[in-house]
Amino acid sequence: MDLEQFAALRTPEGSAALDAAARVAGGDPLTAAAALRSAGVRAGLAAAALTQAELRRRAAGKFGPAAAGMFFTRAGLEQATRGVVARRRAERLRAAGVGTLADLGCGLGADALAAARAGIRVYGVEADPLTAAMAAANAEAAGLADLFTVECGDATEFDVTRVDGVFCDPARRKAGTGRRIFDPNAYSPPWDFVTGLAERVPHTVVKVAPGLDHALIPAGAEAEWVSVDGDLVEAALWCGALAEVPRRATLLREKEGPVTAVQLTGSGDAEAPVSRPRGFLFDPDSAVVRAHLVAELAGDLDATLADPSIAYLYGDEARSTPFARCLEITDVLPFSLKRLRALLRERRVGRVEILKRGSALEPEKLRRDLKLAGDESASLVLTRVAGAPTVLICRPLPA
């Protein structure tokens, strides 16, 4: 889509095309396109409307019902912050006293809209003209155009003395190809500019990829990893007055009932004790693992590692925790396909869940090689114990 096509979608004719596209989207794309053309929608406008209808359908998981009135690009939707995460970030900024915020690289406006809803005046800057136009349209659709305005330009040239807070989500995909960028120095804006914001603005937040190397975390910053319903979705650096602890893992739940949040904090450099596997295994949430807070969780659970490099914890009794899944261990075996297959056959295990950390085995290939048959189920954990390849046969416990 280009600016001309987007402008066409903003006309009464375009609105009608979007409404028609919403009714036929989700099925066969050729059939949907034919339906719009038979209804008198021009081919180019029909294609643009159907693209938006499909992106809005995908965006519902991130934005909820609001997605139905928003505009998206494919790349922008992929990088956009989930609504539940953006709301929580906005609430924390507002609680810290941020009243004016620059969103440098605002994309489609997910974070800016959440901040505006929290009562913060947001100045968005976006380098891509189409994305900037869509962000402005999204602010208008949300009734927040008086609190969130967008300018198309270079984020590095924005006068940050105008605001008391900055949020920056540097582009981590290559323009034109959409390929992921793993080197922070190739981000846009560049990493040195992003990390330098903390020295210029008292409240600075930087959204980063969950795989960020801890060595890149600026001194004095709080690094937070966030998971939603068990899926690790992002990391963020809280700088200046916003930094409260060295490391934080935040687990959000929104699938069932009201959104809940639990947090684990710590230094990020503590080490858990190492011992043999015990009766119960704890599989920590990915946010806990990435935040290097497994040792803190081990202390809470009176648990130990069986290998200093593998983030599985072991305890003598089952304990309920929101930060890890608990499984009861029935067998600990040196890995042997022949022995494992014979044991599962003996126990009539026909269904297995396969978890792994520290193992090069491919779960689906192992599943085929086991040639399972039977009406029982089990969980298999592929891991290492004291450096040796090991398989644990387990029974999951209720949450």
Image (spheres, grey):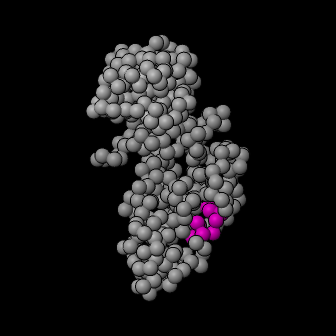
Residue with the most extreme top position: 275
Give the x, y percent position of residue 77.
Answer: 52, 59
Whether residue 352 is visible: yes
Give the x, y percent position of residue 272.
Answer: 51, 18
Residue with the most extreme bottom position: 40
Residue at 53% x, 31% y: name it.
361
Name the quarter where the C terminus is drawn.
Answer: top left
Residue at 42% x, 17% y: name it.
332
Whether residue 327 is visible: no
Name the quarter where the N terminus is drawn.
Answer: bottom right
- 282 up-or-down from 364: above or below: above
- 378 up-or-down from 301: above or below: below
* Circle count: 0
User: Residue 184 lies in what quarter of the image?
Assistant: top right
Residue at 63% x, 51% y: name it.
180
**Left or right: where 198 falls relative to 36:** right
In the image, residue 102 lies in the stretch drawn in magenta: no
> What's drawn in magenta, residue-wise?
125-133
Give the x, y percent position of residue 321.
Answer: 36, 29
- 134 up-or-down from 202: above or below: below
Give the x, y percent position of residue 293.
Answer: 50, 28
In the image, residue 128 lies in the stretch drawn in magenta: yes
Residue at 59% x, 67% y: name it.
132
**Left or right: where 342 falls relative to 149:** left
